[in-house]
C-alpha cells in the first residue's frame, strides 16, 4: 500500500520558489517517496525523531514518515546552506 504525500504549511511555497530544474528533480524524488519512504541513500537526521532527508545536488528535502497514517509529510525544502537552520 502506498503512502500519501502531504506538504506542511508554507513548504509547497518553498518548493515553487526553487529553480525549475531543481523542482523537476526533487518532484520526482518526492513522488517516489509514496512507494518507498526510505529509499537507498536516505539519511535520518540525528537528534530528531522520524525526520529523514533526501538530496539532489545542493538541495534537500526533509520529511517525516507517519507509519500509522501512511503519510509522508514534507517538512522543509531548500538549499543545503539554509535547510538546517531553525
Image (cartoon, grey):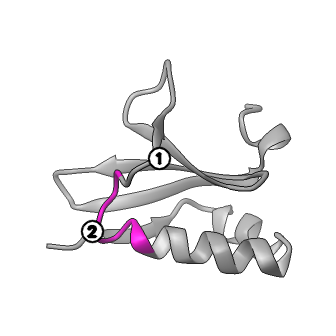
Q: Position of residue 32 (x, y in %)?
A: 41, 72
Number of on-image labels: 2
In 3D space, how far apart are the residues under numbered discs 2 and 1 (Cα atoms)?
Answer: 19 Å
Note whether 28 is above or below 78 in the view shown: below
Highlighted magenta segment, given as a residue range: 32-38
Determine the residue located farthest toward the top in the rendered image.
47
Q: Residue at image x 44%, y 68%?
A: 6
- Asked whether, in this view, residue 38 is left or right of residue 29, the answer is left
80 left or right of 71?
A: right
User: What residue is shown at x 75% (from left), y 64% (from top)?
Assistant: 14
Q: Is residue 16 left or right of residue 2?
A: right
Q: Residue furthest front?
A: 40
* Residue with the mark numbered 1: 41
Residue 78 position within the rendered picture, expressed as x and y whole percent measured from the top left: 75, 54
| Label 2 sits on residue | 3
Rendered residue at 49%/18% (across/down):
47
The N terminus appears in which quarter of the rendering? bottom left
Where is the C terminus found, in terms of image quarters?
top right
Amino acid at each position: 500500500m502506498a503512502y500519501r504525500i502531504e506538504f506542511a504549511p508554507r513548504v509547497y511555497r518553498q518548493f515553487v520558489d526553487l529553480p525549475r530544474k531543481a523542482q523537476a528533480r526533487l518532484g520526482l524524488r518526492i513522488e517516489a517517496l509514496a512507494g518507498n519512504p526510505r529509499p537507498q541513500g536516505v539519511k535520518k537526521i540525528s537528534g530528531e525523531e522520524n525526520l529523514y532527508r533526501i538530496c539532489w545536488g545542493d538541495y534537500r528535502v526533509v520529511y517525516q514518515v507517519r507509519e500509522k497514517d501512511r503519510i509522508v509529510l514534507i517538512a522543509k525544502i531548500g538549499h543545503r546552506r539554509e535547510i538546517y537552520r531553525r
